[in-house]
Amino acid sequence: MASITIRNLDDEVKELLRRLAAENNRSMEEQARVMIRAAVDGQIGPGRIDQIEKTLRELTSSPSAATPVAALAGKIVPRGTLSGKRILLIIGGGIAAYKALDLIRRLRERGAAVRVVMTAAAQEFVTTLSVGALSADHVFTELFDRNDEHDVGHIRLSREADLLVVAPATADLMAKLANGHANDLASTVLLATDKPVLMAPAMNPKMWSHLATRRNRATLGKDGVTFVGPARGEMAESNEAGEGRMAEPLEIVAAVEALLYAGPKPLTGRKIIVTSGPTHEPIDPVRYIANRSSGKQGHAIAAALARLGADVRLVSGPVSIADPAGVKTIHVERAQEMRDAVERLLPADAAVFVAAVADWRSENSAGEKIKKVAGEGPPVLRMVENPDILAGVGHHSQRPGLVVGFAAETQDLLRNAQAKLAKKGADLIVANDVSHESGIGPSGVMGGDRNRVRIVSKAGVEEWPEMTKDEVAARLAALIAERLKAIVV
Ligand code: CTP
């Protein structure tokens, strides 16, 4: 179940929800879900919404209450970014198949119609019953099912969709498509389609790094298949970690939105560099200095710029989230590696520095693990300053036409941001408050999903309201497109 943050709603809407929930003997969250589900499922037509709004207004003592249902929907439900889109989801057999259930819900929440094909192996992990209940459609499993009244044939199945999503994409499904096999419904549909295909691989790290899988991944990439993930991190099997964890449902949804996005692409032909995530500065082969950056904001910006048509090069420090779809991602660990990667990418039209680069590194990282030696006490680390990547590019002979920095501050936000603008040679600084008092999200801005920023430029300061990191990304991408319009190359 998606979590609904009642506390983020307007007071007026909250009050209405409280009354309705009490009347129906439901929790406020449950009441909101019931209303949203009814609206999404089309059970509430436009006339009915008007009627409910009228009733809601009568329920409230304030005659000026603005359209509460619309307000409520706008606050909690992601607007219909996929409305009218038809997605054929192929669920492969892997422990990550359970995440496909949430993926179906997330896609439908956004207005997409989701039809599902499950491989035989997938049915060992999740049941057709739960998949069918969530997709509200028949679940397709057999290639030849003459008794099945729902049988629409594999050709129609694959052609009636706008996009095919394979999640989890197992090593087997990847191998089948890379080599043109068609011996079950899933592989046949994939081979028969003339629609774009998005794969979210999920497998054991050893299987992912196997040369055969690497080869298949490269072949599929050349054939035009788009990939989202896999991410690094703990695997479902105990004691296994590495690259192979399936991208999270919302990351897959973002990739779907990017592929199906049909809006204007004002950044076509523009090359934009983005840095994201923390850096890890080694102390010895097993220890490092790091910070709390999750990479969520930087990755979301890279994805939003790509959606607007930019050729995005993302230089990412170590993060546990998936590479955004449609973005060329370069993985680095240390600040010096990040600087070198960024400089190799110049020239570019714009650069956005979101990474939380470590300001210092240990002067001499030890080649071997530093051991505790009885009587010697703890080692003393001498720190030296890391290169300032933003300042380097801001004053570079190949400086991009637009340079955007971030300023993470716990105090004197605006003064510090303005100082950074001048010192680092940036055109814009996106300033955010990372203090505990910022109160955004359960773990604050760093690691959380929400952000509240101010855009600082020579022209002044623009305050943006609190929103999700995806919304900040979309708005910043639009601002960058606007600013680049004025820069003719
Ligand atoms: N930045 C960078 N290279 C560094 C340090 C910071 O590119 N070595 C960039 C960040 O990506 C961000 C901006 O500079 O866009 C500001 O980062 P921030 O950590 O807020 O500032 P610092 O320069 O590190 O200054 P301080 O930590 O003293 O606030």
Image (spheres, rainbow, N blue to C red):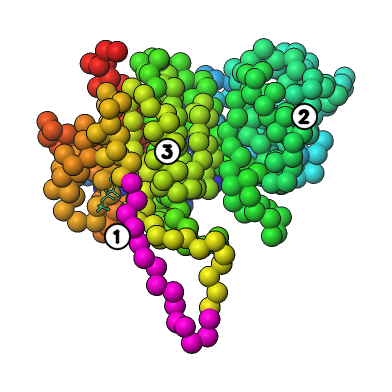
Q: Amino acid at mark 3?
A: Asp
In the image, taking residue 305 as reference, residue 227 lies left or right, namely right
Which residues are drawn in magenta?
373-387
Q: Tags 2 and 1 in contact by the CB under 8 Å rule? A: no
Secondary structure character of the magenta stretch overall: loop
Q: Nearer the viewer, residue 75 or 57?
A: 75
Residue 397, image x, y percentages:
27, 27
Q: Nearer the viewer, mark 1 or mark 3?
A: 3
Q: Is residue 318 above or below residue 92?
A: below
The numbered dot on residue 321 is none
Q: Which residue is mark 1?
A: 436
The residue that appears at 40% across and 35% down in the rendered structure is 342
The numbered dot on residue 340 is 3
Specify the quadrant of the image occupied by residue 198.
top right
- Secondary structure state at the residue bearing disc 2: helix
Asked if residue 381 can be seen in this view, the reply is yes
Q: Nearer the viewer, residue 450 or 394?
A: 394
In the image, taking residue 456 as reference, residue 268 lies left or right, namely right
Residue 273 sits inside the magenta stretch: no
The residue that appears at 39% across and 33% down in the rendered structure is 343
Residue 454, image x, y percentages:
22, 40
Label 1 crowd (10 A; few <14 / some 14-19 / many >=20): few
Q: Which residue is mark 2?
A: 175
Q: Tags 3 and 2 in contact by the CB under 8 Å rule? A: no
Upstream in sequence: badge 1 or badge 3:
3
Q: Is the distance from the Cβ of mark 2 to the nearest ligand 1 atom less than 8 Å? A: no
C-alpha gap between disc 3 and disc 2: 35 Å
Residue 472, image x, y percentages:
33, 36
